[in-house]
Amino acid sequence: MKNRFFNLTTLSLVLSSLLLTFSCSDDSNDIIEEEKEESSRWITVAAARMGDNPGDGNGGTLIYSISSEDAKDPTKSIAPFDNGFIVPSNRTARLQASEDGSTIFNISYAGDTGGNYSKYTVNGGQNFTPTGSEVSIAPYVGSAPRWIKLFDGDKTGSAVYVSTEKIYDDKGTEDETDDTYLRTEATMGVVTLDLENSLIKNFQEQSIPLSSEEEANGYYISRIDMPTLNAAGNKLYIGARLSKVDPTTGETDREGDVLGSKTIVLDYPSLLNPTIISSTVGYGNTNGYRSINAFLYNGSVYQANQGDPNGSHILKIDANNQYDNDYVFNLDDALGVTGAYVLAWRPAANGKAVLAYRHDGSAEGVAGQQGFFALIDLEAKTATKIDEIPYEADFYLFQYQGFAVDGNEIYLTQAPVGKNGNIYVIDTETGAVTKGAELINVEGSHFIGTW
């Protein structure tokens, strides 16, 4: 029979043994700590419950943690939907973890608690202990914030939003059909949050215009996300999505040319002096979706783009805070597919990464297009599909959020919507793949990653 954590009989036996042998406390936290060896770290699995439709993840988020040793053990089995910790969030929670996996950070998404920041100490199983105080960032960036933990030693988080307004000439109002469209004003808000002390560090709101030519042609920044610090720690990069209207009518235009990928660059920590840089290698968006979209490696920031007509690229921003247009890493070419689309990715410290993606040949499943995992190398600019992981049409990765990194190893979850699966561990240095603990699923739901 599969082993299950928090089985009452097993827990009782472990407790009795500890009392007789070590005369230690009967506190369950002590028991769980005994199960995790000193060389291990916690691996937290996140599960998104179905709301109205399979794979929508709108029924809430549950998390469950196990040791890295147990995560690698295929005889182990966990069922977060049955006994996981419910993370406060009206819809799918936006989770982050400390670099050692000992702390989970959450900002609730939407609903009455939307925008509330909280953090938890990871104790194993469903045991997550609230730590520190809560703070709401909703007054700054709304109740459904897009936020990320900066890689500065778990000290700072940053959340962003953009609001837009069409500007017409003085002949009338936007409601009148004979008005002349001029441009769309995009206003960006950025807040930084002290994760250690639950305090707002800074907030700035300012305009982020494109070039006069781009705006005259109807382009504007419509969504921003995934703030990333540069190596010097003095600039913050924010990914951007561009939208377009027909300048003759002011109506949405989805047939226009896709512009070069863009990133907003701000002074840090002041969050002032925004500028916009553009790539001549990649086209499309750089804001990502629910996972971190840009990472610092070897002094440069590497960033995925989405919606590129030539397939997603990994782009490079150098220490001069400009795109390196000599660095060309096209995933269509590297993977031998067409229409590659990066859904999520995460590098280890060696510059090799696991990437979740779909492409034009992906089957249509119950919740959307089928996803795949690949091992990529940022320096060699190579990408190889991980064939040891099983795939099927309902393996849905569009909402995938997190990969747990432990040295050169990267942990991920594999389970089609509504079906059981497993944790897999990728040794990014050797390419070895380990099939780990079984993941017990429930109807219409799916797993969104590890932390």
Image (cartoon, grey):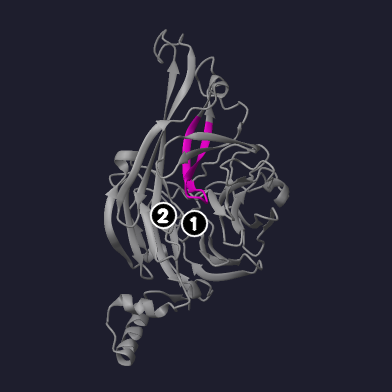
Tell me, yes or no, whether the highlighted magenta stretch contains residue 240.
yes
Task: Find residue 312 and report its image quarter.
Answer: top right
Going from N to C along the chain, the mark reached first, 2 or 1, is 2
Q: Which residues are magenta?
A: 221-242
Q: Is residue 149 left or right of residue 305?
A: left
**Residue linked to disc 1:** 402
Label 2 with label 1: CB-CB less than 8 Å: yes
* Relative vertical location of residue 219 with respect to residue 20 in this rendering, above or below: above
Q: Is residue 132 left or right of residue 48?
A: left
From the top left corner, tell me how far across and down residue 137 is, in percent: 32, 44
Q: Is residue 40 left or right of residue 380?
A: left
From the top left corner, tell me how far across and down residue 354 is, in percent: 59, 58
Residue 115 seen in the current view: no
Q: Which residue is at the front of the view, 226 or 374?
A: 226
From the top left corner, tell me how far across and down residue 440 is, in percent: 47, 65
* Relative vertical location of residue 253 with respect to residue 329 in this rendering, above or below: above
The label on residue 283 is none
Three-letter code for the amino acid on which mark 1 is drawn: Gly
From the top left corner, tell me how far across and down residue 222 is, in percent: 48, 32
The label on residue 95 is 2
- Residue displayed at 49% across by 18% down: 250
